[in-house]
C-alpha cells in the first residue's frame, strides 16, 4: 500500500466515479483502476462496488476511507511542519470569504496580517458560499468561511460563530436607527434579497414562511454593494448579518434594526480539505479574523444590551 493508492481511492470515493476522479487527479481511468485493484489485492478485501452509475463503498471501504483521509492529512501536515522549521511563515495562502467578512472584518485583519507576515503571498477571493465551497473542493482556495451546513464529501467544516440578522434600510426613514423591529409590524415587506438558489435566500425564505409574513415585492440582487446602495435610497429593505454592518453602527449612513419576535441568526463555518493540512500562514490569519469577529460581536452586544 502506498500514498498514490490512497490518493486514488479517496479521489474516487469523493467524486463518485472513476471518470470524475481521473479529471480531478489528472490521471487516466485505467491507471486509477489499476491502483484500486492493487490496493484491494494488498488488503485482500473489496473496497468499492462498481455500478453503471458510478461507485459505492463496501462495508470495508467505508471503514478504510476514514483511515485513508486521516493518513493523507497527517502526511500533509508532516510535510508542512518540516517546511516551516525555518520559523519564517511564507508561501501562498488562498482565502475565500463571503461579503459579510470582506466588508465587515477584512480591512483591519489584512492590515495586521500583512505587516506581521510580509513573506506570505496572500490571495483573498470574495464570493457566495456555493462558489467558495467549490473553490476549496477544486484546490483553488486553501479554506473558506461560509454559512454552516453539512460539509460536502472531501471537506471538513469547523464552527466559527453565530451572528444576529439585521434589517437594513434607508436612513431618515420611519424606523429609528438600532431600534429592534418585528417584521410582522412592517408588512407587506418590500425586500432586496440574493437570488433564489443562494444559501442566504433559502434561509430567509424559510424564515419568512415560518413566520407567515406577507411580502409585497422581492427584487433579486446578487450584488452586495448594489443592494446596499439600493436600500439606502429607496423604501426597500434587506436582511444582512450584523457582522457586515458593524462599521455602520456609528456612521448612521444606513438604518440598522435588529430583528426580534422572532430573531433570525446565521452560523458560520470554516471549510477546508479533509485530506490536506492548511498552510502554516492559515492559522495566524484565522486567529486575527476570529479576534476581529469577537470585537464585532462585542460591539453589537453593547448595542443590543446596553449597560
Image: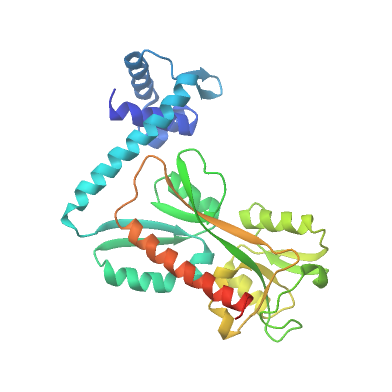
Q: Would residue 134 appear left or right of 175 to someone viewing this image? A: left
Image quadrant where residue 218 sits? bottom right
Q: Examine the rendered structure and indicate whether residue 249 appears above or below residue 283.
A: below
* Residue 117, horizontal then vertical, whole percent: 27, 66
Q: Quadrant of the N terminus?
A: top left
Q: Would residue 304 appear left or right of 73 to someone viewing this image? A: right
- Nearer to us in this view, 133 or 161: 161
Q: Examine the rendered structure and indicate whether residue 78 appears above or below residue 71.
A: below
* Residue 5, horizontal then vertical, whole percent: 33, 26
Image point (67%, 84%), residue name: 171
Q: Examine the rendered structure and indicate whether residue 103 appears above or below residue 46.
A: below
Which residue is at the far bottom? 172
Q: How many marks?
A: 0
Q: Would residue 206 appear left or right of 228 to someone viewing this image? A: right
Q: Quadrant of the C terminus?
A: bottom right
* Residue 254, horizontal then vertical, whole percent: 63, 80
- Nearer to us in this view, 61 or 15: 61
Image point (78%, 55%), residue name: 209
Image point (62%, 66%), residue name: 164
Image point (34%, 50%), residue name: 278
Amino acid at each position: 500500500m502506498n500514498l498514490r493508492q490512497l490518493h486514488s481511492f479517496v479521489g474516487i470515493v469523493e467524486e463518485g466515479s472513476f471518470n470524475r476522479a481521473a479529471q480531478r487527479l489528472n490521471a487516466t481511468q485505467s491507471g486509477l483502476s489499476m491502483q484500486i485493484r492493487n490496493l484491494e489485492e494488498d488488503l485482500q478485501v473489496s473496497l468499492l462496488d462498481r455500478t453503471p452509475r458510478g461507485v459505492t463503498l463496501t462495508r470495508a471501504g467505508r471503514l478504510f476511507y476514514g483511515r485513508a483521509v486521516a493518513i493523507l492529512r497527517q502526511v500533509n501536515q508532516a510535510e508542512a511542519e518540516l517546511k516551516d522549521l525555518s520559523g519564517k511563515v511564507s508561501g501562498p495562502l488562498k482565502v475565500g470569504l463571503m461579503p459579510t467578512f470582506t466588508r465587515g472584518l477584512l480591512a483591519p485583519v489584512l492590515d495586521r496580517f500583512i505587516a506581521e507576515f510580509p513573506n506570505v503571498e496572500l490571495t483573498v477571493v470574495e464570493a457566495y458560499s456555493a462558489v467558495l465551497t467549490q473553490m476549496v473542493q477544486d484546490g483553488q482556495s486553501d479554506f473558506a468561511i461560509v454559512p454552516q451546513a453539512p460539509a460536502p464529501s472531501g471537506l471538513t467544516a469547523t464552527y466559527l460563530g453565530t451572528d444576529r440578522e439585521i434589517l437594513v434600510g434607508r436612513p431618515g426613514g420611519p424606523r429609528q436607527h438600532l431600534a429592534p423591529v418585528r417584521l410582522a409590524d412592517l408588512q407587506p415587506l418590500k425586500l432586496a434579497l440574493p437570488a433564489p438558489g443562494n444559501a442566504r435566500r433559502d434561509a430567509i425564505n424559510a424564515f419568512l414562511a415560518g413566520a407567515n409574513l406577507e411580502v409585497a415585492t422581492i427584487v433579486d440582487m446578487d450584488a452586495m454593494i448594489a443592494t446596499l446602495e439600493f436600500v439606502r435610497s429607496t423604501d426597500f429593505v434587506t436582511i444582512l448579518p450584523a457582522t457586515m454592518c458593524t462599521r455602520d453602527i456609528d456612521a448612521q449612513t444606513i438604518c440598522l434594526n435588529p430583528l426580534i419576535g422572532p430573531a433570525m441568526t446565521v452560523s458560520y463555518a470554516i471549510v477546508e480539505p479533509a485530506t490536506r493540512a492548511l498552510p502554516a500562514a492559515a492559522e495566524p490569519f484565522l486567529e486575527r479574523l476570529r479576534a476581529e469577529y469577537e470585537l464585532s460581536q462585542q460591539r453589537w452586544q453593547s448595542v443590543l444590551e446596553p449597560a
